[in-house]
Amino acid sequence: MQIKANDYKPKEIVKFIREWTDLTQNDFAKSINRSRKTIEGYEYGTVNVSLATFLKMCKEHNIEVIVRKK
C-alpha cells in the first residue's frame, strides 16, 4: 500500500503505519519502546511525533520513506 503523505495529517499517517502492522496500540508501542498512551496521543493528535520517532516506526516495521522534490 502507498499513500501521499502530503495529503494527510501526521496523526493519520501514524495510524496508517500502525494499522499496516496489524498490531494493537500496546504492541506497536512496545515495538518502538513507547507507551500505549503515547501512541494514542500520536493517533489523536494530542502528542506530536518527532521525525526521529517516525523514522524509527518505519524502520522497525519495514516501511519505506521517500522524500522527493517535485
Image (spheres, rainbow, N blue to C red):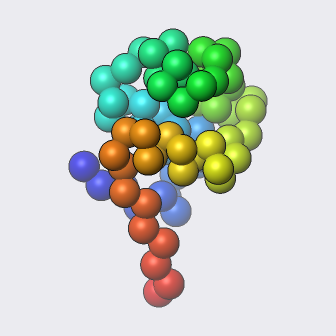
Q: Report x, y in % for residue 45.
A: 68, 34
User: From where the camera sits, is residue 22 visible?
Assistant: yes
Work out which residue is located at the far bottom of the displayed protein and give it: 70
Q: Which of 19/28 is in front? A: 28
Work out which residue is located at the far left of the displayed protein and give it: 1
User: From where the camera sits, is residue 25 visible?
Assistant: no
Q: Residue at x 54, y 22 (%)?
A: 29
* 25 horizontally vs 44: left or right: left
Q: Residue at x 25, y 49 (%)?
A: 1
Q: Is residue 26 above or below residue 8?
A: above
Q: Is residue 15 above or below residue 56?
A: above
The number of numbered discs placed on residues in the rendered structure image is 0
Q: Which of 46/24 is in front? A: 24
Q: Report x, y in % for residue 6.
A: 52, 62
Q: Residue at x 62, y 43 (%)?
A: 53
Q: Residue at x 52, y 19 (%)?
A: 30
* 38 horizontally vs 59: left or right: right
Q: Is residue 27 above or below residue 65?
A: above
Q: Is residue 62 above or below residue 47?
A: below
Q: Report x, y in % for residue 8.
A: 52, 51
Q: Report x, y in % for residue 28.
A: 47, 23
